[in-house]
């Protein structure tokens, strides 16, 4: 240091004082930016870790999470005032007495036999921890804990799984600890007990809950005559279409396994239509660039369906619905793929195992939808159909005054024409080329029920909503008059995480599909969709309210009437800075074709607007883009 005159080597070399801001306290709390390590966009962007110092080989901080994984990242936020491994003693608390509530004998015995076991002599719990609740399994498991008010008496109270109160959605499971909560003033410690609330029903009640079981295990499925026939029909279709050939597996080639999938097909009223068995390839074992290349395949847009149906009502056109049998078996494969033989249908050659060399597409292959659509498009183009530029799944044929429209959604097809005889003539060659089922007049398409009335068409999704309510255990709850509370502004910063995030996202995805015929829930669904990456308990309450609103308005839908004119009229609106997290605005619009509502949207804007006028102009531009596209679509439809 005498040679350097009291200066550090860094200061002598760079003529500046060294920067010590990068030095952090070892073993402190830190929050690294984990986006480079995430495999899915819905994963958390950060999590609490412990700082372990610097990485000698890379420029970054070493962070240790609770699972023992070490991350090396440059973007880290530090909390040097707290250390996760610092041992601190919790302040002593005076134990309080706990008053217990004896459970019903029927509730403890399950079927009503046996004596009840009292929960008396329970150990005391520390003061301040009595309102902690134990999470229940399931998507709609909600805590019934109530914050402690005055006094130190607390009660262990089990919520009945048949109690349809406004805040109870708990389904009790055997062996689950009941929720511990404080007893509010005026709480009834002896609620009315009925046999139905205790799970005791008459045998005739269970007849309303019988459902056709869809087996998963192949051995179990073949014990049933219906499922055996379904699997045999699928296998016969594979052989008839020459989907594959049995060969020996070439050396250095990968073989892909397959499985049987059984599904009950139902009518719009829920009755069984048929039993379907499918042989599905495990496409997740395919390798990109070897087993497949292109995978994209278009489907018809919901707005296109509404536009064409509105025109059909206006001009009194015929509506026909068909379904292609074994649709993916019609597509041709360009790749060389080997598959194991279908389970329970194996064959051998001189004791040597054989594999299936696929010649056509099969369910489960990543390129199967694309191969089928290319096959159908080639046939329709050779049949003088024109491919729409506005919607790739809309095919149009005009011969003089004769018009035929085809709306394609994989294997479900709607055929619309101004002459019934022309549609019948077109069905014959289509049936000879592709085996199809003629379902007659359009009545049920993609979960949408189409009711023909004296004044036009009524579109609803009653069965789809009913199935969703049953799946989410909300079918017995009381309905609400509105889908959301006006004063309830959702945020991702307040609340606790839900127990099952995947189930939450599944319910929200199903609600998005209901928007096709329910414009009244568009805004509410748009709000809960923005919070799927980290759903909280307050978001779960918003989902429950939407489901209860759908339960009260299950018969609502979109009504198409014979409009006197076909002019496009659009309305747009916007909300300025109504997002609590980033102050983004929301654009909304609805567009009418005559008197029929055919397009609507509610979407958050991508940028922050500085004035209400700017927000309105952005919303107006979104509506203008939609109107321009609709005008182009109507031009292709020769309207």
Image: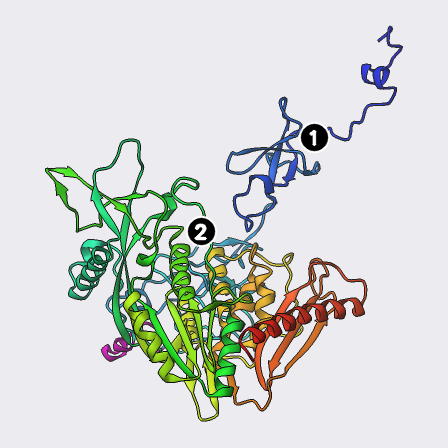
The residue tagged 2 is 295
- Label annotation for residue 133: none
Secondary element type, mark 2: loop
Q: In this view, does 231 lie to the left or right of 195?
A: left
The C terminus sits in image quarter: bottom right
Dot 1, how many residues are within 10 Å of its Cα: few (below 14), some (14-19), or many (20+)? Answer: some
The segment highlighted magenta reads 194-208
Q: Can residue 109 be seen in this view?
A: yes
Task: Provide residue 319's location: percent of width, then percent of height.
Answer: 41, 81
Q: Is residue 207 above or below residue 237?
A: below
Secondary element type, mark 1: loop
**Residue sitting nearer the eye, 605 or 542:** 605
Residue 121 lies in what quarter of the image? Answer: bottom left
Q: Is residue 124 above or below residue 626?
A: above
> Residue farthest to the bottom?
454
The residue tagged 1 is 25
Q: Is residue 154 visible?
A: no
Whole-number angstrom distance, CA of label 2 to CA of label 1? 51 Å
Of the two numbered discs 2 and 1 on the same chain, state the one appearing first in sequence.
1
């Amino acid at each position: 240091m005498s040679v350097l005159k009291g200066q550090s080597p860094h200061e002598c070399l760079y003529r500046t004082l060294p920067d010590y801001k990068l030095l952090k306290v070892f073993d402190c709390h830190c929050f690294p930016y984990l986006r480079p390590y995430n495999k899915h966009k819905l994963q958390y962007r950060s999590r609490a870790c412990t700082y372990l110092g610097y990485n000698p080989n890379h420029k970054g901080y070493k962070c240790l999470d609770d699972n023992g994984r070490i991350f090396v990242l440059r973007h880290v936020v530090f909390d040097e005032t707290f250390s996760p491994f610092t041992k601190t003693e919790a302040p002593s608390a005076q134990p309080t007495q706990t008053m217990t509530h004896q459970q019903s004998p029927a509730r403890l015995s399950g079927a009503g036999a046996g004596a009840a076991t009292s929960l008396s002599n329970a150990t005391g719990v520390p003061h301040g921890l009595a309102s902690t609740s134990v999470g229940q399994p399931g998507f709609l498991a909600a805590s019934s804990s109530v914050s402690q008010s005055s006094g130190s008496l607390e009660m262990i109270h089990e919520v009945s799984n048949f109690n349809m109160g406004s805040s109870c959605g708990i389904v009790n499971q055997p062996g689950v600890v009941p929720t511990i909560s404080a007893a509010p003033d005026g709480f009834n410690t002896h609620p009315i007990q009925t046999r139905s609330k205790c799970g005791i029903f008459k045998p005739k009640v269970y007849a309303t809950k019988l459902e056709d079981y869809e087996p998963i295990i192949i051995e179990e499925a073949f014990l049933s005559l219906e499922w055996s026939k379904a699997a045999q029909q699928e296998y016969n279709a594979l052989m008839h279409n020459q989907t594959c050939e049995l060969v020996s597996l070439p050396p250095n080639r990968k073989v892909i396994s397959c499985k049987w999938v059984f599904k009950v097909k139902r009518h719009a009223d829920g009755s069984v239509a048929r039993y379907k068995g499918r042989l599905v390839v495990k496409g997740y074992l395919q390798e990109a660039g070897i087993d497949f290349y292109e995978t994209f395949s278009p489907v018809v847009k919901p707005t296109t369906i509404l536009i064409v149906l509105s025109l059909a009502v206006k001009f009194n056109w015929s509506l026909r619905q068909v379904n292609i049998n074994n649709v993916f078996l019609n597509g041709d494969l360009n790749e060389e793929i080997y598959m194991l033989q279908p389970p329970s249908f194996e064959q051998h050659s001189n004791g040597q195992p054989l594999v299936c060399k696929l010649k056509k597409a099969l369910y489960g292959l990543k390129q199967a939808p694309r191969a089928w659509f290319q096959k159908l498009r080639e046939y329709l183009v050779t049949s003088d159909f024109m491919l729409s530029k506005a919607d790739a799944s809309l095919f149009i044929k005009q011969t003089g005054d004769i018009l035929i429209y085809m709306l394609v959604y994989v294997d479900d097809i709607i055929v619309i024409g101004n002459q019934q005889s022309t549609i019948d003539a077109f069905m014959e060659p289509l049936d000879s080329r592709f085996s199809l089922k003629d379902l007659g007049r359009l009545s049920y398409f993609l979960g949408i029920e189409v009711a023909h009335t004296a004044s036009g068409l009524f579109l609803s999704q009653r069965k789809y909503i009913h199935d969703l309510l049953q799946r989410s255990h909300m079918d017995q709850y009381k309905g609400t008059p509105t889908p959301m509370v006006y004063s309830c502004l959702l945020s991702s910063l307040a609340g606790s995480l839900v127990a099952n995030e995947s189930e939450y996202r599944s319910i929200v995805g199903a609600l998005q599909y209901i928007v096709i015929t329910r414009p009244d829930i568009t805004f509410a669904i748009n709000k809960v969709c923005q919070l799927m990456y980290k759903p909280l308990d307050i978001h779960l309450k918003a989902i429950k309210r939407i489901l209860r609103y759908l339960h009260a308005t299950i018969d609502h839908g979109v009504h198409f009437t014979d409009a006197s004119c076909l002019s496009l009229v659009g309305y747009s609106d916007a909300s300025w800075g109504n997002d609590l997290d980033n102050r983004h605005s929301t654009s909304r619009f609805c567009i009418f074709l005559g008197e029929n509502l055919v397009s609507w949207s509610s979407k958050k804007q991508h940028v922050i607007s500085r004035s209400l006028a700017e927000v309105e102009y952005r919303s107006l531009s979104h509506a203008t883009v939609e109107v321009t596209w609709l005008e182009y679509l109507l031009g292709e439809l020769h309207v």
